[in-house]
Amino acid sequence: MTWEIVIGLESHAQLSTASKIFSSASTAFGAAPNTQASVVDLALPGVLPVLNKGAVERAIRFGLAVGANIHRRSIFARKNYFYPDLPKGYQISQYELPIVQGGSLSIQTKSGEKVVHLTRAHLEEDAGKSLHENFQGMSGIDLNRAGTPLLEIVSEPEMSSAEEAVAYAKALHSLVRWIGICDGNMQEGSFRCDANVSVRRPGAPLGTRREIKNLNSFRFLQQAIEYEVKWQIETLEDGGKIQQATVLFDPDSGQTRVMRLKEDAHDYRYFPDPDLLPLEITSAWIEDIKTEMPELPGAMSERFQHEDGLSANDATMMTQSRALAKYYEDTRNVCLKPKLAANWIMGEISKRLRANELAIEDCPIRADVLGALILRIEEGALLKTRAPELLDELWSIPSRLEGNRPVGATTFVTTTPQRPVGPGAGSAVIFQTPLVLIDQIIQARDLGQSTDVSALEGIVDQVVASNQKSVEEYKAGKEKAFNSLVGQVMKASQGKANPAQVNAILKHKLR
């Protein structure tokens, strides 16, 4: 008999507020240990928490993005447990009345689109951090992170493979960054997942779950779930039983190990926090936030398909982030060729970004410059086969905007201290439009196509005269022979001949 896998994720998104959820201490990453822990974070006697309005706004923004119910009244509770990096002995969270209830998220799987429903999303504070390295026989405690605002997003147990769980986590990660509530930096712990995994026989009740804690990369998420599923199935098939537990994933061994037996909700002894009044949210406040929401990736993807003619896959790729979507739109607006814009971004631009470990926001080639390059290729002024050389040139030119002009401004500024292009030598600053810049590099590097028809006809005549066998084969109906002749002409022209012109002249000559 086969086994069914049941997976639900609890994802923690660190909210992008400048201060903590209940104190004015900074949330900046990387400060020296315990330099950003206020008296509230340290739980000194007599201090009281004050709720951060920005954290609430970001939770509302998420609820709107996933089509959830935003409770007009929610309650903060104390979740009681003892841990060295939790000074109060309890965590302020939400339990019975969370701020966000329900909602859903669409993901792309091998079988097509799948909708994963959300149980809830609630506000809470983060704990501190225990430090075990560089300490002999003891641990250090850094409370800088204590009190950092988190939105815990809980899915329904509706995923049935590690691949689906990763697709969901990636979609969620993209969404919280898209709507600006979390920077998504997984290396810094800004976005991390806990995976609840169980297996069962088809049609049987849900099996006993084990929770894999604090997975801060998509690769670790997939590896941890795959190992846990394999371990649970082997344990059950050998006659063993699964005990509910919290486990950790060791990336070095690729295995999970038990950290503690899993508590249930009653073990945390939840009760309403007496220091915090119920959170009241007005309809007017929600409407104000709704008017400031950006176009969501799903809606934008649909628009790119209907208005630009992109495929569903290309539209999804172009909406992986707001920065990428803007880069695509700025490129398309210059070249007026949506499909070509998407192809160049997914191809040559993405290849260079990966090689240099850069995000699209840091791409040295501006979107309007890429659009100008595509335009010149379509006009026949630039050989497509030589375009990568031009991209390499653009990548190496230090560039900046004139003043604070936004991307898409008509004036482009380059400084060329080593290899001046066009007028202006040395380290002079050259103010020019993207098309002028492209034209100057085409001319300086001799990357353009030949437009001399008579010269091209001469090359065709030479190729026809010296390849009579291919000529006879073409006249006998062998199309490959014609392609061979085209290749000979392109080679003789050093790749500078216009392929369309070559085809036309050859066919005329071979009548």
Image: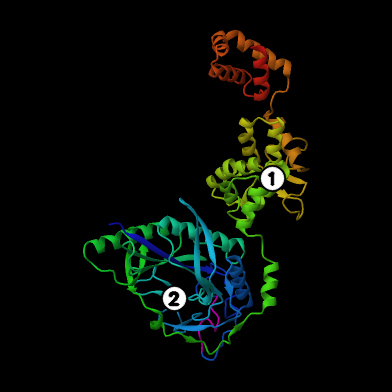
Disc 2 on helix, strand or loop? strand
- Stretch in magenta: 36-44
Can you give x and y, in whole percent of width and height, for residue 206 in the image?
Answer: 35, 68
Residue 141: image tag: 2
Residue 181: image tag: none
Q: Is residue 344 above or below residue 406?
A: above
- Comparing 354 with 157, the one in front is 157
Q: Is residue 45 above or below residue 315?
A: below
Can you give x and y, in whole percent of width and height, for residue 2 in the image?
Answer: 30, 57
Q: Is residue 26 above or below residue 461?
A: below
Residue 332: image tag: 1
Can you give x and y, in whole percent of width and height, for residue 94 in the image?
Answer: 51, 79
Instruction: Please state which amino acid type lies under the numbered disc 1.
Output: Arg
Disc 1 on helix, strand or loop? helix
- The question of residue 198 being in magenta is answered with no
Which residue extends farthest front? 203
- Comparing 332 with 111, the one in front is 111
Quadrant location of the C terminus in the rendered image: top right
Which residue extends farthest bottom? 46
